Amino acid sequence: MAEASHLMRDRRGDFGCCLLAYRKRDGRSQLSLALDAGVSCRHLGFLETGRARPSANMVARLADALGLESAERDRLLLAAGLAPRSASGLHHGDAVRETGALGTRALEAAVALAGSTSPLRSTEIAAGFFGQIGIGHFMTGTLRGSPGRWDIQRDAGGVPAVAWLEHNYANRYRNTDYLVRATAVRNRGFFWSDIPRDAMTGEQRRILAEGRDFRINDGFVLPIPMGDGSVRAFSSWSEYLDPDPVTRVAASLVARALVENLHDLAHLPAR
């Protein structure tokens, strides 16, 4: 029995076990907790079984739904590999180590990307890192043109949100999509949530709202302006993403390495 329990913990991971224990203690079904936390029952099941990793925002929503005390919230964050919010939950040295851990993982991914010789391997490396911060879909490419006449050339590799892109294309949203416009004019990484809602048109707000039907609520974009007026960019989609400064810097490092790698691979001389 002890061995079976140990195997289950390995499968679920610390976060899954911790979340399941709090849910059972509260006498809640997965459906009840999912409704209160504003998450799909399927995704909650993935979190409990270790098939998905939560962002800090997702942990906070689950903790609110479960009515957890401060110490219990910190325990849930620690189990997810995230830094606790209260001073009592984590000593300063531990906080530094947690921040450093994400930076180390980002650096390792960037170095691996620099040595990758195939789009498939580059996609695997990037997916391994971005999956840890809540990004499940991404692509890179080059944006050219001007308002009303955007052209996007996608690189090989990546894990694009195909259904959403097909919806976007079918509705001819490219030339009004606020993300395309923001990518064209910005020169540093940004989260979708960085863009004020009142700066969007009614149509752009509708596009954002429609993304939720595809389990897309946020994303991270890294534009890299080029001397010829084009913009190379990394674009991603996420159901739950914690837009904190550490995540921004780590994501920027790996995104830039991926953009450069896939671009270089596409322009290698034929052998």
Image: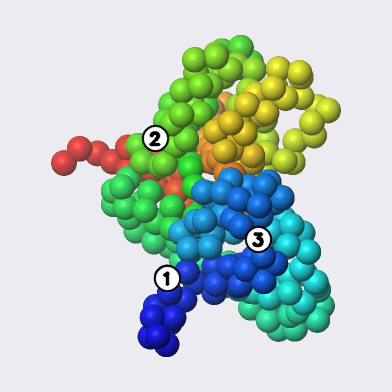
Q: Nearer the viewer, mark 1 or mark 3?
A: 3
In primary-sequence order, the first of circles 1 and 2 is 1
Task: Label 1, secondary structure: give it.
Answer: helix
Q: Amino acid at mark 2?
A: Asp
Quadrant in the rendering for residue 206? top right
Q: In this orientation, does residue 199 appear?
A: yes
Q: What is the C-alpha distance between the residues marked 1 and 2? A: 35 Å
Residue 28 got which mark?
3
Task: Label 3, secondary structure: give it.
Answer: loop
Q: In this orientation, does residue 253 appear?
A: no
Disc 3 crowd, CA 10 A, few/some/many (<14, 14-19, 20+): some
What is the quadrant of the N terminus in the image? bottom left
Q: Nearer the viewer, mark 2 or mark 3?
A: 3
In primary-sequence order, the first of circles 2 and 3 is 3
Q: Is 37 left or right of 168, judged from the image as shown?
A: right
Query: Residue at horizontal 63%, vertical 26%?
Result: 210
Q: Nearer the viewer, mark 1 or mark 2?
A: 1
Quadrant in the rendering for residue 94? bottom right
Q: What is the C-alpha distance between the residues marked 1 and 3? A: 22 Å
Task: Label 2, secondary structure: give it.
Answer: loop
Residue 11 got which mark?
1
Proximity of marks 1 and 3: CB atoms separated by less than 8 Å = no
Q: Is 264 left or right of 59, judged from the image as shown?
A: left
Q: Amino acid at mark 3?
A: Arg
Of the pair 40 and 149, the residue shown nearer to us: 40
Q: Position of residue 258 (x, y in %)?
A: 45, 48
Considering only vertical position in the picture, is 79 above or below 174?
below
Q: Is 231 left or right of 108, judged from the image as shown?
A: right
Q: Amino acid at mark 1?
A: Arg
Residue tagged 2: 155
Q: Position of residue 74 (x, y in %)?
A: 72, 73
